[in-house]
């Protein structure tokens, strides 16, 4: 009993410390950047601040999520976890996961830790992809900004199409049964990580399981996280906005696939890209083209691909990007055909 109290007290103290660190990331990143010989307000300064902020943010989220998922797995078997998110009928779990993404205002790199936690807990692959698509693309922050900047009509349409894309893409990937295309270490976690022990574990046992899960997963993923965030920081600071405005104002059919391809190597969360969306619409850009660009930036990105590559095989990464890119193209063409 005393041992349990010590572990619980230590965990509470650790969570408080985590919250304090997370709440100070913005001033801390700006403070560290102030010591560098970089002109404030320059593109390089934006990239550096982004990297100094996003790196600890994503790693802290990864630590927290993998610890919590490791602890939760001591209560649920893989079968029970799968049942909770899969639902009784096909698509129910995808809808639940996509709706969960609305209340998690993460960029793609921030959503990946929770995605890894779902995958390692044995949640169906298609369901986890529904969350991974929805979390960065559709959330309350993005919807609130869209409502305030471009009106309720665009906000509701974007919500409907974003959720539909997340659900349908997840169902398609789920039907392909590509679990064998996960990396070996992830498949091992899915096989062994969620078994319920014969004896009921104590609170200390549950906490230790969470710490073991965090150490194992973070130890394998952190270099890819940092590499992905570094690529995202460079793109964030040097995005060619003038080129985007000219391209999106073009009414040609190829403007939609062009901006989707242009958006994939970029990196931003939905809240960060919405001011750009407002400016582009103000310049007369087609609504479908602009929203296709926004979806590709938030749901598909080079940093995300780099990070996911540690979890997914190259084949599965390409399937994921292909299915989502196809859905985004469909959204863009439909918007331009019927709503302009």
Image (tube, rainbow, N blue to C red):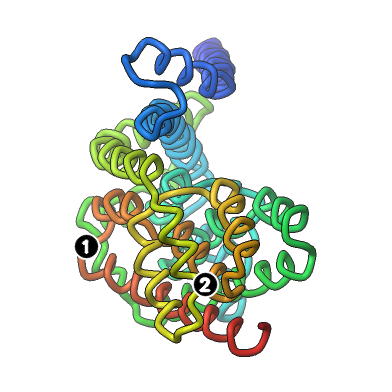
Looking at the image, residue 238 lies above or below residue 340? above
Task: Say which residue appears at 36% left-offset and 37% top-offset.
Answer: 213
Where is residue 13? Give x, y as percent.
Answer: 56, 13
Q: Nearer the viewer, residue 37 or 205?
A: 37
Looking at the image, residue 331 lies above or below residue 236? below
How many residues crowd mark 1 within 10 Å: few (<14), some (14–19), many (20+)? Answer: some
Where is residue 238? Give x, y as percent.
Answer: 36, 44
Mark found first going from the N terminus, 1 or 2: 2
Q: CA distance from mark 1 to mark 2?
A: 37 Å
Can you say which quadrant of the picture contains the N terminus? Answer: top right
Q: Give the SS element for disc 2.
A: loop
Q: Give the SS element for disc 1.
A: loop
Disc 1 and disc 2 in contact, CB within 8 angstroms: no
Q: Nearer the viewer, residue 40 or 308?
A: 40
Instruction: Kindly indicate the quadrant of the structure image that contains residue 17.
Output: top right
How many residues crowd mark 2 within 10 Å: few (<14), some (14–19), many (20+)? Answer: some
Looking at the image, residue 87 lies above or below residue 44? below
Task: Say which residue appears at 35% left-offset and 69% top-offset.
Answer: 261
Task: Say which residue appears at 25% left-offset and 42% top-offset.
Answer: 224
Residue 249's disc is 2
Residue 202's disc is none
Where is residue 112? Give x, y as percent.
Answer: 42, 49
Instruction: Kindly indicate the quadrant of the structure image that contains residue 257.
Output: bottom left
Instruction: Kindly indicate the quadrant of the structure image that contains residue 182.
Output: bottom left
Residue 273 at least partly seen: yes
Residue extending farthest to the bottom is 337
Q: Which residue is mark 1?
A: 313
């Amino acid at each position: 009993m005393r041992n349990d109290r010590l572990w619980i007290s230590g965990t509470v103290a650790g969570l408080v410390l985590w919250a304090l660190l997370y709440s100070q990331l913005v001033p801390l990143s700006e403070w560290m950047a102030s010591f560098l010989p970089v002109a404030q307000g320059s593109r390089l300064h934006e990239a550096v601040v982004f990297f100094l902020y996003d790196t600890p943010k994503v790693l802290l989220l990864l630590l927290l999520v993998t610890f919590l998922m490791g602890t939760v797995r001591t209560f649920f078997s893989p079968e029970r976890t799968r049942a909770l998110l899969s639902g009784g009928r096909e698509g129910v779990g995808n809808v639940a996961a996509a709706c969960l993404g609305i209340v998690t205002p993460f960029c793609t790199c921030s959503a990946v830790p929770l995605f890894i936690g779902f995958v390692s807990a044995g949640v169906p692959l298609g369901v986890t992809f529904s969350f991974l698509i929805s979390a960065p693309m559709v959330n309350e922050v993005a919807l609130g900004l869209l409502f305030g900047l471009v009106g309720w009509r665009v906000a509701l349409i974007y919500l409907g199409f974003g959720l539909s894309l997340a659900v349908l893409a997840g169902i398609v990937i789920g039907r392909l049964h590509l679990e064998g295309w996960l990396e070996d270490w992830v498949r091992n976690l899915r096989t062994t990580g969620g078994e319920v022990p014969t004896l009921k574990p104590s609170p200390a046992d549950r906490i230790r399981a969470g710490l073991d899960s965090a150490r194992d997963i973070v130890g394998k993923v952190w270099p890819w996280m940092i590499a992905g965030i570094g690529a995202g920081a460079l793109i964030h600071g040097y995005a060619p906005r003038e080129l985007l405005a000219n391209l999106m104002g073009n009414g040609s059919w190829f403007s939609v696939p062009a901006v989707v391809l242009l958006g994939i190597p970029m990196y931003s969360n939905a809240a960060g890209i919405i001011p750009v969306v407002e400016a582009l619409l103000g310049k007369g850009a087609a609504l479908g083209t602009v929203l296709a660009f926004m979806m590709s930036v938030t749901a598909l990105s080079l940093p995300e691909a780099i990070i996911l590559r540690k979890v997914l095989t190259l084949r599965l990464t390409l399937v994921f990007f292909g299915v989502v890119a196809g859905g985004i193209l469909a959204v863009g063409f439909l918007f331009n055909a019927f709503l302009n």
